[in-house]
Image: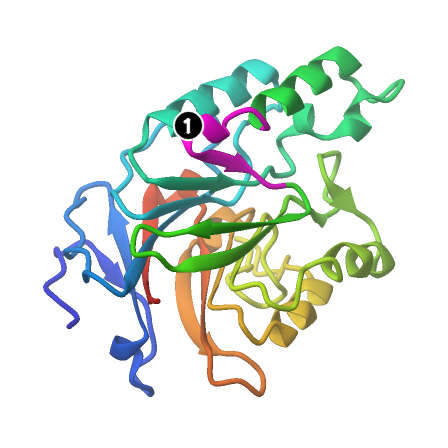
Amino acid sequence: MRGKLKPRSRYFGRRSFPWTILLRVWQDLLSSLEVPPHPGPGWTRFVCISDTHSRKFRVPSGDVLLHGGDLSSWGSLSELTKTVEWLKTLDHPVKIMVAGNHDLCLDEKWGQPDWGMEPEVIQRARAYVHSQSSSRLHYLEYEPLHFTSPSGRVWRVYGSPAAPIHVEGAFQYASSTEAKAIYDRIPDDTEILITHTPPYRTLDRTRKGKHAGCNVLSTRVEDLKHCRLHIFGHIHESSGAHVDSGKDTEVYRVSVNAAMDSSESAVVVDLRD
């Protein structure tokens, strides 16, 4: 079931439970795009990326592409357009993205007086990302989405661009009260969660050794009893994945820091329908 990995590929997962009957997790490096074959009927393959910052990467095929934000580097509309036009060329039947703290042109706050961006630019950027559904590309901003995978499984997704404040950026919050208001909006039946920030102490360690994730998000994720996949980015140096069981539930959850800017690798997650 595990298959044969290329020498430079990495596998993430615990062996203390029968993970092979529920999910498979692979990280595929640019030097080796040959991930194992799709497991077939009854499975959905998710390809997870984040923090592409207007760069283009070779990305493995799959049923669903998830992007965890930081579509741009400096928040300009031209950078955003470059990334979106690239994502539109990818062959995944369903593609879902959120923004991140670098994506200033998508945050309406940055169109206010003295915030540094023209309101017209904000309006154009937001209209642009919301108009891509004909290309099978969906932008989520504090909102849910239900989609049907090629196998016929209906998945419940929720996407949020928010992150704790760090210098000046987009979609940031400064207090636990703000964070709670944001993450309380996640529906209890969410199965696939996309946030830009990681939860606290989950693939969130900076190069200085600090855990930079959000405590409030961590608590909320533990309460999502149906959540099977949580993808995020933001902390480039902690890219990777691990598998764990949620609190008081039999559902195994995959946590993925899909930051590409550091690892230049996508994480591929196969979930049994």
Residue 79 vertical position relative to residue 238 in the rendered view, above or below: above
Q: Dot 1 corresponds to which residue?
A: 135
Question: If the image is split into quadrants, where does the N terminus sit?
Answer: bottom left
State the residue at coordinates (34%, 56%). Answer: 152
State the residue at coordinates (53%, 68%). Answer: 227
| Viewer-side residue, 49 vs 149 | 149
In this orientation, does residue 155 appear? yes
Q: Is residue 121 toward the left or the right of residue 78 in the image?
A: right
Q: Is residue 136 located in the magenta-colored stretch of the structure?
A: yes
Q: Is residue 8 toward the left or the right of residue 243 in the image?
A: left
State the residue at coordinates (33%, 72%). Answer: 13
In this orientation, does residue 118 appear? no
Task: From the top left corner, tell me how far across and down residue 91 is, in percent.
Answer: 29, 34
Question: Of all residues shown, which one is farthest toward the front?
Answer: 152
Question: Of all residues shown, which one is farthest toward the right?
Answer: 113
Which scheme is used to colour this image of the protein? rainbow
| Viewer-side residue, 102 vs 211 | 102
User: What secondary structure is marked by label 1?
Assistant: helix
Task: From the top left corner, tell me how far across and down residue 212 is, in percent.
Answer: 64, 57
Crowd around label 1: few <14 · some 14–19 · many ≥20 (10 Å): some
Task: From the top left corner, tell me how far across and down residue 39 is, in percent.
Answer: 19, 62
Q: Is residue 21 toward the left or the right of residue 83 in the image?
A: left
Q: Is residue 90 located in the magenta-colored stretch of the structure?
A: no
Question: If the image is split into quadrants, where does the C terminus sit?
Answer: bottom left
Region in magenta: 130-140
State the residue at coordinates (44%, 58%). Answer: 154
Residue 52 vertical position relative to residue 231 in the rendered view, above or below: above
Task: From the top left corner, tell me how far across and down residue 24 is, in percent.
Answer: 28, 67
**Identity of the amino acid at label 1?**
Ser
Residue 209 vertical position relative to residue 171 in the rendered view, above or below: below
